[in-house]
Amino acid sequence: MHAHSTGEKITREIFFPLEIANGITGIRDMFSDCYPNCSFNNGTLDDGISLEEINEWRRQFAARTLVAPRIIASSPLVDGLGARWKGSLIVKDADEGREAVHYIKRRGSDFVKVYSRLSRDAYFAIADEAKKQNMVFAGHIPDSVTAIEASDAGQKSVEHLTGILLAASTDETILRSETLAWREGKAKMSRKEIDEKILATYSDTKATTLFARFVRNETWMCPTLILLRGGAFLDDKSFTNDARLKYLPPSFRDDWKPANDSRFKDLTAADFAFKRKRFQKYLEIVGAMHRAGVKILAGVDEPNQFCFPGFSLHDELALLVQAGLTPFEALQTATVNPAKYLNLTDSLGTIKKGKMADLVLLEANPLDDIGNTKRIAAVVFDGRYLSKKALEKMLADVEAVANKK
């Protein structure tokens, strides 16, 4: 429920087969269109994806000429001034926010994705116009908006737990002002000092109130714990020497190295220690949210650092169990919960006569050990049976493509 396609060739030849081989038969692509066109990330991976390309994949899927997951396609990232990602749709005020929703609807995206630097006026205009146009909006909670305000405004899902730590801080107002000032280069504190203060002032009482509001408003969480873990362990070679790197091209492997990413290249051992401490808090928060009744979705934010297409969804399920969900509840975050979120329970999410034949057959019971989701015996995808031998060939073919010279 949180994935990213990249260039057409890499997505078709690497991402899709890795996803199907891992039993993933559907994805919610969170950057499905570029405005007006873009190069994904910082240009080291591949070209971005357009809605036209995704629609072509959908046509090929319907004609059974392409083995690929079903795709729910987002808009471009709708962001404010200073947006980080190329291809974002920049809006400066309420009028432009409303026009962005109309543009996205005309394009045919399945939902609007909001991002971190939106102004308050623009964000609330997008929320209001999306409701008028009967469109879902989801994504990051912008720094200018509180988590409670985003929930009350109707944001359907929150990605990566953005805004949650700040919303639960006893110094939320001051630290929000500092965060916004930091973006403009005017803060009295460094980014590290702000983050440390946010974590140190976390209040269980404020968090409980926040989670109750999420439950009341039916605001979903897609925590992407695997993403949050990845950023915290990039200095640990036992973590980064992952055997699954062989399924990715050298350009990806290079991009994942901290030295090649401005967010990580200057971090010290103390910085990574703080990130690991914060990751442990994120695990606690997800467990507390779940106990409070907040609805959870499994997503990984591939292809960020050590968010492997296909494989990492199994890692995410294990992290959700570590956070406090039972194996059964973790399985629901990747099956029936997405179907409910997408209003597709008539065709997906559970095994029932008349529904789409999407099944993952396992060699051992995941209710005994969530790690057993990796022990895939076969995949039935859209009624097509893919044996273990066929899945192994898919993986071998991906490895060959990734390492072709």
Image: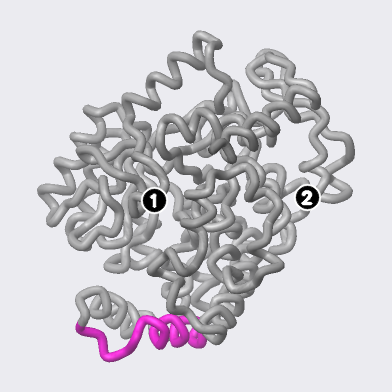
The extreme front residue here reads: 405
Residue at (55% x, 82% y) in the render: 274
In the shown orientation, is residue 87 left or right of residue 319? left
> Which quadrant would the C terminus be assigned to in this image?
top right
In the rendered image, which residue does mark 1 sit on?
44
In the shown orientation, is residue 128 left or right of residue 350? left
Element at badge 1? Answer: loop
Residue at (69% x, 63% y) in the render: 323
The extreme left residue here reads: 95
The answer to which of marks 1 and 2 sits earlier in the sequence is 1
Q: Is residue 286 above or below residue 100?
A: below
**322 falls in the magenta region:** no
Residue at (56% x, 48% y) in the render: 299
In the rendered image, which residue does mark 2 sit on?
327
Image coords of residue 376 (percent x, y): 79, 34
In the shown orientation, is residue 196 left or right of residue 316? left
Choose top left, top right, bottom left or bottom right for residue 148: bottom left
Q: Main secondary structure of the magenta part?
A: helix
Q: Nearer the viewer, mark 1 or mark 2?
A: 1
Label 1, residues with CA under 10 Å away: few <14, some 14-19, many ≥20 = few
The total number of labels drawn is: 2
In the shown orientation, is residue 196 left or right of residue 394? left
Task: State the CA–CA distance, disc 1 to disc 2.
Answer: 37 Å
Image coords of residue 261 (percent x, y): 42, 65
Q: Amino acid at mark 2?
A: Pro
